[in-house]
Amino acid sequence: MADDVQNGEGDIIINLELISYISSSGIRIFVGMVRELDKQGRKLKLCCITPPVKKVFDVVELLDLFEVFETEQEAVNSLSK
């Protein structure tokens, strides 16, 4: 994943559908990714966030940092806009 952030092109979509828990380390990884991508004029898009993970993002007030989509298809469709 780090190579995709540092050497890739375009936005990155991460589907969180199978993730039921996220630690503070996981949050730091997402924040680091969004900051690095922002420097490159790119976006990190999240989709299919499960309720427990969404709650963590809400508690630490980070949802505004990301583009969040209900479905993966909505995230993919946003790439062409």
Image (spheres, rainbow, N blue to C red):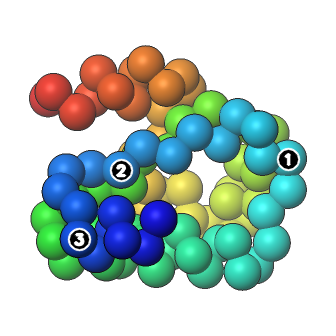
As drawn, 50 above or below 31: above
Q: Quadrant of residue 41?
A: bottom left
Depth order, front residue of 14/68: 14
Q: Is residue 20 above or below residue 78?
A: below
Residue at image position (75%, 78%) is: 24
Label 3 near label 2: C-beta < 8 Å? no
Q: Image point 36% across, 71% down: which residue?
A: 3
Q: Is residue 18 left or right of residue 57?
A: right
Q: Which mark is residue 49?
A: none
Residue designated by label 1: 20
Q: Of the residues shown, which amino acid type is indicated by label 2?
A: Ile
Q: Residue at x 70, y 34 (%)?
A: 17
Please provide percent x and percent y for residue 37: 28, 69
Determine whether, in the image, residue 53 is placed left or right of residue 46: right
The residue carrying mark 2 is: 12
Residues under labels 1 and 3: Cα distance?
Answer: 29 Å
Instruction: Identify the residue under disc 3.
Output: 7
Question: Mark 2, mark 3: which one is toward the viewer?
Answer: 3
> The residue tagged with tag 1: helix, strand or loop?
loop
Which mark is first along the chain, 3 or 1?
3
User: Mark 3, residues whose alpha carbon is within 10 Å: few (<14), some, or many (≥20)?
Assistant: few
SS under mark 3? helix
Distance in Å between CA atoms under marks 2 and 3:
12 Å
28 sits to left or right of 74: right
Give the crowd class for mark 2: few <14, some 14-19, many >=20 residues within 10 Å. many
Residue type at mark 3: give it.
Asn
Residue 21 at x, y = what percent?
85, 56
The image quadrant of residue 40 is: bottom left
Q: Is residue 24 left or right of residue 73?
A: right
Is residue 43 visible from the viewing direction of this image?
Answer: yes
Label 2's element? strand
